[in-house]
Amino acid sequence: MEFFNREKEINYLLKVLSFEPNLIYFIYGPINSEKTALIKYIIENELDKDRYVIFYINLREHFISKYEDFIEVLFNTYEESLIEKIKRYLLSFIRDLPDNIDVKSTILTGVPIPKNLLNEFLSSKNSENVFKYLTKIFEKIKKEGKQPVLIIDELQKIGDLKINGYLIYELFNFFIDLTKEKHLCHVLCLSSDSLFIERVYNEGMLKDRCKYYLVDDFDYETTKAFLKKHNFNDEEIEIVWHYFGGKPIKLVEAVQEKLLGEDIKEFCKKSLRVRKRQLKDLLYSLEDENKDLFEGVIKLFENLKNRDEIFYEKITDEIVWTVKKNILFVNIEEGILKAQSKLDLLATREVLDEIKV
């Protein structure tokens, strides 16, 4: 399914990348709100490949349980037979970059490095050497008249990794050095984990050194235009909006169901029944495990019975549970708690009528 109408978000991020690097940007939003699709679309269709060198690291694609896993994901290795060549490589590599790497390609999925040098990084477990190497790469790219951009997707996957303390804090310091201090490289971090973003938001070390950009679901007009494009009539559009709101992945499913000749209203009703069943299973399991937390979650849901969103003062155990189960979403800048999707909101309300505390 084609990428559809994110002009506001595209223009905002293009302006960010046109500026001198000065801040870390955290791009977040509900699950399946097209954060990754948005970034890939910009890289592939909007950026001047003669001006930018993009390093896109998608942690979602990898199992990462320790420091070494992250370092191996960060780099793309190639064979270098003589260790004596490494110093010369560090000085000359970027000069030869156009010959070694097609910088006009869509996405570079790792920073090139000789295999034996990577092995040294892994054996020493010294993140400082890793960061020095990356800085040299970015500095040389800048001297060649290009702007390096580092994008890390699903950054929360390394939130709990430790190497001389939490790796994430060492990364944040490195990102600050690249942006706020050296103005060397743009850094964009994507995450659908709003609890992780909330944790980042409250880190004192990042104050005035980062910005947060919310990529939300489609609004009504965008949803209507998308469905109109796929020959939905007015009644079908209202039905889909009622059940799914502007959740892109559900809109795509609705289009596919229509193409298959299925009845849209029945598809929406079935989707709600399925989500209700899933929520009930989660809640009944929680009741068996932790009765007090279960009762607290039910009270939290009751606050959403007549409202689409509520304000919160602090992150409670109930909020943590609902966010981790992808039922609710935290908008950290506005202190707002809402359902991950319209379907989740409807399912939550109906489940409240059927579950007794």
Image (spheres, helix red, strand yellow):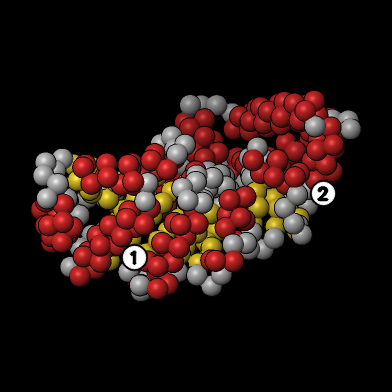
Picture coordinates of residue 278, whole percent (x, y):
68, 28
Residue at figure coordinates x 70%, y 41% from the top left:
322
User: Which residue type carries mark 2?
Assistant: Asn
For label 2, the residue is: 303
Secondary structure of the residue carrying numbered label 1: loop
For label 1, the residue is: 185
Instruction: Give the class, few, some or many, for how many residues have Cα within 10 Å of label 1's Cα (few <14, many ≥20).
Output: many
Question: Which of disc 1 and disc 2 is earlier in sequence?
Answer: 1
Q: Is residue 70 left or right of residue 88?
A: right
Q: Is residue 264 above or below residue 52?
A: above
Q: Is residue 78 above or below residue 183?
A: above
Image quarter where the N terminus lies is top left
Viewer-closest of 159 and 56: 159
Picture coordinates of residue 284, whole percent (x, y):
78, 26
Q: CA distance from mark 2 to mark 1?
A: 43 Å
Secondary structure of the residue carrying numbered label 2: loop
User: Which residue type carries mark 1?
Assistant: Cys
Viewer-closest of 249 and 63: 63
Picture coordinates of residue 29, whole percent (x, y):
56, 52
Q: Is residue 316 above or below residue 132?
A: above
Looking at the rendered image, the disc whose residue lies closer to the viewer, 2 or 1, is 1
Picture coordinates of residue 35, whole percent (x, y):
47, 50
Residue at figure coordinates x 76%, y 59% from the top left:
313
Residue at figure coordinates x 64%, y 40% from the top left:
324
Instruction: Give the class, few, some or many, for how many residues have Cα within 10 Å of label 2's Cα (few <14, many ≥20).
Output: some
Image quarter where the C terminus lies is top right
